[in-house]
Structure formats: C-alpha cells, structure tokens
C-alpha cells in the first residue's frame, strides 16, 4: 500500500515549505493539495498550481499532485501550460488528480455564474480532459468543442514525463469509462455509512469497464482519499493498519491521509500521524 498525504495551502510559505520538506522526510509517496479558490469558505487558500511549483523547488523525491483539479474555474490551455511548467520544475514528479468537481459554491461549482446540469457537468469534464490530453501530447493543436476551443496551440514540448499521469476521480459509469480511456489511475472518495462496500462495488464496476476497454485493471493505481467518513484512519497505528489492510484486500493500491489540521475535523495527534507515516518509508 502506497501512502500519500494531503497538505493544506493555507499557511504562510515559510511554514508550508517546512511542511513539504517534512512530508518528504517522512517518506510519503505523494503530497497533494485541493485545487480550490476558497475551499469550504476558507481564505486565504493558495493556488494549487503555484503551491506545487513552490513545493517542487524545495523537494526532490516526493511526487506532487492536485486532488483534484476541475473545470469549475480552469480552462484547458492555461491549465496545460501550468502542468508543463510544474512537470519541468519538479523533474517529472507531477501527477494530475482530476475530477468534475463539486456543484456547490463552497467547492467553486458556480463561480463562473452558471449552474450546470449533471449532464452538462459530465460533458464539460470529458471535453476538458480530452483537450488536456491532446494539449499535453501534441503540437499545433486545434480543437473545436462545445465548451472550449483552441487554435494551433503548442504546449507539450519540454515535458519531462511523456504526459503527466491523469488520476481520474469518477464514481459513475461515465467517469469510469473516461478513466479507462485516458486515465493512468483512479481516485475513490466514498461517502455514506458503508464506504468499504461502496468502494468494493465501484472497483468491480471499474474492472468490468477496463476489461471492455482493453485496459489492464490490475496495473492501474487506485487511490483512496480518506478523511470524509467516520472511519478512524488516524486514531491509532492499529486502526490505520486494520483499515489499510481491508481496503488493500478490495484492490486499493494507494491511500491518502490528511496532515493534521488543528481546530478542524481533520485534526489528529501529530505523533500518531508521524508513526503512521513511517509505513510510507
């Protein structure tokens, strides 16, 4: 099981730089930030891409990523340019976690002053991912879409990775089909009273969709984002080991836990957190 950490881009940079360095020292496979303007109303909330560029400059091993970035306020061309830049600064350590995004104001769902229908949100997301893929793999890219277009745009040259991996968050059939077509990994964020059972069902569905698309399901990383259910991931080392073991049996390959955030629902004992982090080394 690969262990990752979600960091909070809400502190002054000298403190954030120290946190990123500590995350790397602890051996986490990846460090992630949520890509929002003011997530759940918290401000300041530093820009995810600028934060990752800064993190890339003060680390050398840990992978960096968004969890997740969305088309809620990002358009394909400048997003692809930012991705290339961070990939180059980091020496090829960027993983792009992407999803359709939330539809509430506190998750930036309406900041473009439009209330998208579920169908429109899915259409926009698929078009957005498709254009990102083309922009990061081609030259003189032209595209004409329903929501975005491009004319002879060249961004891909200079990438360290052939194309930074896309880890796609999609729990519905359409999102899973997109993950099977263009994704390099899949992100699970189950809710409700039975998150493990929900995850099991989603993994079975993803496996079937991958088989239909000719994708190697077993080789695809499957990241579980924790911290949004009642499961006590950071209560103790034993609790973490139990939950990680159960999800590994289901087929989850990667787990993301949150850096303790005092005064929030993501608070945890720092010593326990670092003891759990030892499993990442």
Image: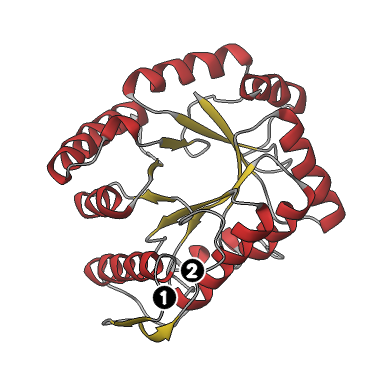
Seen in the picture, residue 110 relative to 31 is either above or below; the reply is: below
Q: In 3D space, how far apart are the residues under numbered discs 2 and 1 (Cα atoms)?
A: 7 Å
Label 2 Cα neighbours within 10 Å, binned few <14 / some 14-19 / many ≥20: many
Q: Earlier in the sequence, mark 2 or mark 1?
A: 1
Residue indicated by mark 1: 139
Secondary structure beneath dot 1 equals loop
Q: Are marks 2 and 1 in contact (CB under 8 Å)?
A: yes
- Residue 188 percent location from the top left of the image: 38, 40
Q: What color scheme is it?
A: secondary structure
- Residue 55 percent location from the top left of the image: 73, 53
| Drawn side of residue 33 relative to residue 220, left or right | right
- Residue 2 percent location from the top left of the image: 52, 28
Identify which residue, 116 or 73, lies in the foreground. Answer: 73
Mark on residue 156?
Answer: 2
The residue at the point 35 percent across, 27 percent down is: 196
Label 1 Cα neighbours within 10 Å, binned few <14 / some 14-19 / many ≥20: some
In the orientation shown, which residue stands out farthest toward the bottom?
Answer: 151
| Drawn side of residue 261 relative to residue 206, left or right | right
| Drawn side of residue 124 relative to residue 205, left or right | right
In the orientation shown, which residue stands out farthest toward the right?
Answer: 14
Residue 235 in view (yes/no): no
- Residue 131 percent location from the top left of the image: 35, 71
The residue at the point 46 percent across, 57 percent down is: 163
Q: To which quarter of the image does residue 59 belong?
A: top right
Seen in the picture, residue 88 relative to 248 is either above or below; the reply is: below
């Amino acid at each position: 099981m690969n262990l990752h950490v979600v960091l909070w881009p809400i502190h002054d940079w000298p403190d954030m730089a120290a946190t990123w360095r500590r995350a790397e020292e602890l051996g986490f496979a990846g460090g992630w930030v949520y890509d929002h303007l003011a997530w759940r109303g918290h401000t300041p909330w530093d820009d995810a891409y600028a934060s990752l560029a800064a993190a890339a400059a003060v680390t050398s091993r840990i992978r960096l990523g968004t969890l997740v970035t969305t088309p809620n306020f990002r358009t394909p061309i400048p997003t692809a340019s930012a991705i290339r830049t961070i990939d180059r600064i980091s020496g090829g350590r960027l993983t792009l976690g992407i999803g359709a995004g939330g539809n509430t104001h506190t998750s930036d769902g309406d900041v473009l002053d439009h209330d998208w229908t579920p169908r429109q949100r899915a259409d926009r997301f698929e078009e957005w991912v498709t254009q990102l893929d083309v922009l990061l793999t081609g030259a003189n890219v032209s595209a004409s879409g329903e929501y975005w277009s491009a004319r002879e745009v060249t961004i891909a040259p200079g990438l360290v990775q052939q194309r930074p991996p896309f880890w796609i968050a999609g729990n519905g059939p359409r999102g899973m089909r997109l993950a099977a077509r263009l994704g390099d990994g899949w992100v699970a964020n189950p809710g409700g009273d039975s998150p493990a059972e929900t995850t099991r069902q989603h993994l079975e569905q993803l496996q079937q969709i991958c088989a239909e698309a000719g994708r190697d399901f077993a080789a695809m990383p499957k990241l579980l984002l924790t911290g949004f259910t009642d499961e006590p991931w950071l209560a103790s080392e034993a609790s973490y080991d139990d939950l990680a073991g159960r999800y590994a049996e289901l087929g989850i390959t990667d787990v993301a836990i949150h850096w303790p955030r005092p005064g929030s629902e993501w608070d945890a004992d720092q010593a326990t957190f670092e003891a759990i982090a030892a499993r990442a080394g």
